Image: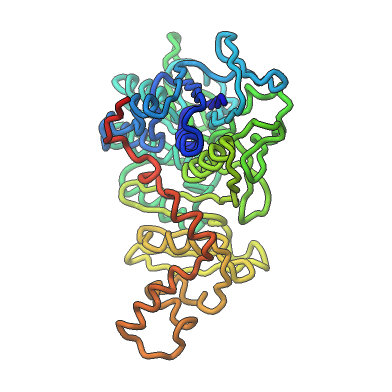
Amino acid sequence: MRYVIAGNSVAAVSAIDAIRRRDQDGEIYVISPEPRTAYCRPLITYKLAGQVPPERLPYRQEGYYRAKGVNLIYGKSLEGLEPEKGRVALTGGERLEYDRLLLAMGAVPFMPPIEGLDGPGVYPFTTMEHLELVEAALRDWREVVVVGAGMIGIKAAEALHLRGLRVTVVELLDRILPIVLDGTSSVWAQREMEKHGMGYILGDSVVAIERDRKGNVQGVSLKSGTRVPAQGVIVAVGVRPNVGPLSSSPLQINKGVVVDDCMETNIEGVYAAGDIVEAYDLILGAKRPIQVWPLAFRQGLIAGANMAGGRRRYVGGFPINAVGFFGFKVASAGLSTVEPDMEESIEVLRFVDEERGIFRKVVLGNNKVMGFLILNDISRAGIYTGLIWSRMDVAGFKEYLVDEVSVPESCRPIVSGTEPWSFDTMKTHRRFGWALFPLSYRKQFTAMPSRIEEICAFDSEVYTL
């Protein structure tokens, strides 16, 4: 059996592990567009900020691939799919045959139609190559504009600020982190940026990059007519599934590659996982791209198992985000931006303590948790996320979800009613905490890493043949 994996990031690595658990002898080929082993992409902004050393980024070394019997093809990309012949076309016209194929090619940065965008001094920021280009350009930059105030944009802006540059963030929408924060919490984020001297412009967009006769960036022009001086521009307005090389194939593609609950596409023997796919959203009840690392890891694990003869199912997922800048912490999942007056069927619970900087918000639909947003004190992120997964009816204790009580105390009405609070009842409540989640979910999700630091388990082992 020959397995071909297009891509070499988190979904590819988890698929390799899953295949080798079931098939020790099959050939595995990994097509790696970048000339390096798998690395933790969420850490590149930390490397830019000088907060992690370069050796911390790769979480799989060459020895890993040798130990797993992987043929690693560096510097080539999948350029076409020929399923009727059971082969893929690679950069340079080379063909590679497969018995099972995994499309794990991730997403590509969206580059908006901005005049003067092409040329030196303007970069996206999603790969090590982008990091290297930006670091090389820093010696010529004093001022920089970051286009987009999403997760990547804010972290890149923080990193550049910490490197001593004057940073201005330009966001088309009316808030910082618009996919994650609501109106109230976005104001808190804006105050944090102002406190640290970082500039931002909301509700406006960059229409042109200004360049001198040599092509060097001199600034940007906004739709409002404002001009912002800069010697460099980071474009961070989002990513899109990397489906371009597959457009002429018979694959079912909407915004991403459509897969079933086994992560198999409409073509037998062809699977997909990670940022390239449209998979089931547990909250919305529909398939769509959800581009977060923990889900890519799970999808790759399930795809790899099924490619090697297993029958594992992907139950779905939902957006899960965690970000911090200047010590300001944000954790969210699901429908985090819903406002109280958006839907009659939606209930929004809030707890706000501005003096201590604590903000908690839980979104309910039919007494089930459909999303949350918490700022600074993010200790409840795990339990809120678990409640979304479990689809548990929280009517019996929902009034405690955001209040200043512990998780065991919030479960007390269900477990013991009016029983006096004691050490023994606390132990009961801790046990009940696990019982919040059906056994099938506990087996499914506690067995798989869910945090980036668990997924990117950096190799300390020296692999030998």
Specify whether residue 170 is in view: no
Where the C terminus falls, by quadrant? top left
- Residue 90, by quadrant, is top right
Residue shown at the point (59%, 9%) measured from the top left: 93
Q: Nearer the viewer, residue 255 or 317?
A: 317
- Residue 284, by quadrant, is bottom right
Q: Position of residue 134 (x, y in %)?
A: 37, 24
Q: Position of residue 177 (x, y in %)?
A: 48, 47
- Residue 272, by quadrant, is top right
Left or right of residue 273, residue 406 in this image: left
Number of labels in the image equals: 0
Q: Nearer the viewer, residue 220 or 226?
A: 220
Q: Is residue 5 above or below residue 428?
A: above
Q: Residue furthest front?
A: 25
Residue shown at the point (60%, 13%) measured from the top left: 95
Residue shown at the point (47%, 59%) measured from the top left: 373
Residue shown at the point (55%, 44%) measured from the top left: 173
